Amino acid sequence: MSNTSKGPSSSAAQRRPNVVVFFTDQQRWDTTGLHGNPLDLTPNLDRVAQQNLHVAHSFTCQPVCGPARSCLQTGLYATTTGCWRNSIPLPADSRTLAHYFGEAGYDTGYIGKWHLYDMDSEGPVPADRRFGYDYWLASNLLEFTSDAYDTVLYDNENNEQRLPGYRVDAVTDAAIRYMDTHQDDPFFLFVSYIEPHHQNHIDDYPPPTGYRERYTGRWIPPDLAALGGSTHQHLGGYYGMVKRLDEAYGRMQDALLSMGLQDDTIVLFTSDHGNHFKTRNGEYKRSCHESSIRVPTVLSGPGFQGAGQLPELVSLIDLPPTLLDAAGIEVPEQMQGRSMMPLVRREATQEWPDDVFVQISEAQTGRAVRTKRWKYGVNAEPSDAPATGRADTYEEQYLYDLDYDPYELTNLIESAAHEPVAQIMADRLRRRMRAAGEQVPEIVAAARGGTGQRQVSEQEAQM
């Protein structure tokens, strides 16, 4: 579907690369071989990452579905879009990636889960709330309109479309059909899976038939092994869903190769947030822990071949400007992240933050900041957290030393020996909140005590 009214389509736009977003839901970073998972769940992603760009330290900026999606679509923090919890639709005047790509002459398509319209509408999304996506085959709340072997999406006219096969395969088939029929002009395609998110009405992780048995009772990440939660009930199915996603990713890369498009197409693989299996609170996400905020991220295609592993800390908010920059499209000034492309091109002048900022809502109103070594989180009491997703006063809740405690099993926030770290991290958090457009809050220090630990030096506290 070519649209010649979008701007510079002709020869200038045709030289631009295609862009595909392969977006999973609730996928932990350590489901991948890239991050040490021993079960060979992601051989396709691992291979592509080794040949292209692996963003080794990648984090969501909002560990819940709708808010994270608002950030990835707009390049703005959830408190800026106003979508700080799931039931808030994307404002009608929002500018999304589809708008920017469309204005540069791209055909734009969206397939899968949307989760940015009114929560009362589980499936269809009106045309004026698709925010620049021309081709539409999606459901607002895919987990409510479909099941593992019953995929229901809605087309441009909001007609119900039932797609055959396991849901991952059904969505992937639709994406490959789109790419095959949109080769004449550059395309921007956003493919949004529900897997490996749990299926709400059964509170389970339904993998393809036979896949649960492959992985039940096998390797368990140390945090889940220590804390339990719903791990033993759910991890086998969850791993089976991840395996099928990787097979779908491999099929998509194969399809691009068969069309002669692999060297002309940027593919971003990432997820909205992780999954802690009810170990950190009463559900699966919405916490500042690595299990909730750290996700796998790989970029392949033109500009990323042979780029290697990126050591810097990268946020979901940085991905929209990166995609635009990689495609040669000017990054809008209002975007709150920054493009990774200067890092990828090894430009020595690029300054990059040495921390990432996380906003947390729904289960708690919290904020967190993470450096390469330290994680610091604060929480607002319900009485101090009005219905705005932000608060004026927070209390210190977490401090983790990730060098020695990567799975965050020892909270140091009450350790007197770590008070210098907490003070420095509190200052970092205030700066990050101000930069995100929030008011600088009061942070109430935790009561500290204890003996027997070496006092952390100021140099260590800055790491």
Image (cartoon, helix red, strand yellow):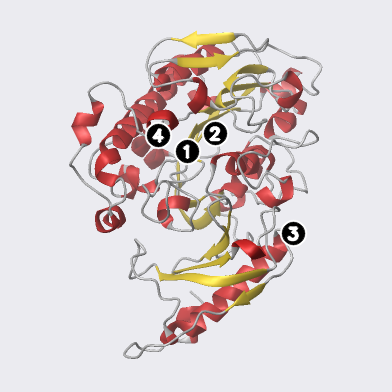
Identity, as a three-letter code, of the amino acid under mark 1: Gln
**Dot in front, 2 or 3:** 3
Residue 433 at x, y percent in the picture? 67, 64
Work out whether residue 262 or residue 365 is closer to the camera in this orientation and state it: 365
Identity, as a three-letter code, of the amino acid under mark 3: Gly
- What kind of element bears circle 2? loop
User: Relative to residue 13, is residue 39 drawn left or right?
Assistant: left
Work out whether residue 266 or residue 457 is closer to the camera in this orientation and state it: 457
Q: Which residue is mark 2?
A: 302
- What kind of element bears circle 3? loop
Task: Please give the name of the residue rendered at 37% of the width and 64% of the height, measured from the top-left corner.
Answer: 408
Q: Are marks 3 and 4 in contact (CB under 8 Å)?
A: no
Report which quarter residue 382 is drawn in: bottom right
Mark 4 or mark 2, earlier in chain: 4
Q: Are marks 4 and 2 in contact (CB under 8 Å)?
A: no
User: Relative to residue 332, is residue 400 drawn left or right?
Assistant: left
Report which quarter residue 98 is drawn in: top right
3D distance between C-alphas at marks 1 and 4: 28 Å
Report crowding for label 2: few under 14, some 14 to 19, many 20 or more residues within 10 A (C-alpha): many
Q: Which residue is mark 1?
A: 305
Q: Which residue is mark 3?
A: 437
- What kind of element bears circle 4? loop
Q: Is residue 338 above or below residue 243?
A: below
Identity, as a three-letter code, of the amino acid under mark 4: Pro
Residue 63 at x, y percent in the picture? 52, 48
Residue 122 at x, y percent in the picture? 59, 24
3D distance between C-alphas at marks 3 and 4: 32 Å
Q: Are marks 1 and 2 in contact (CB under 8 Å)?
A: yes
3D distance between C-alphas at marks 1 and 3: 36 Å
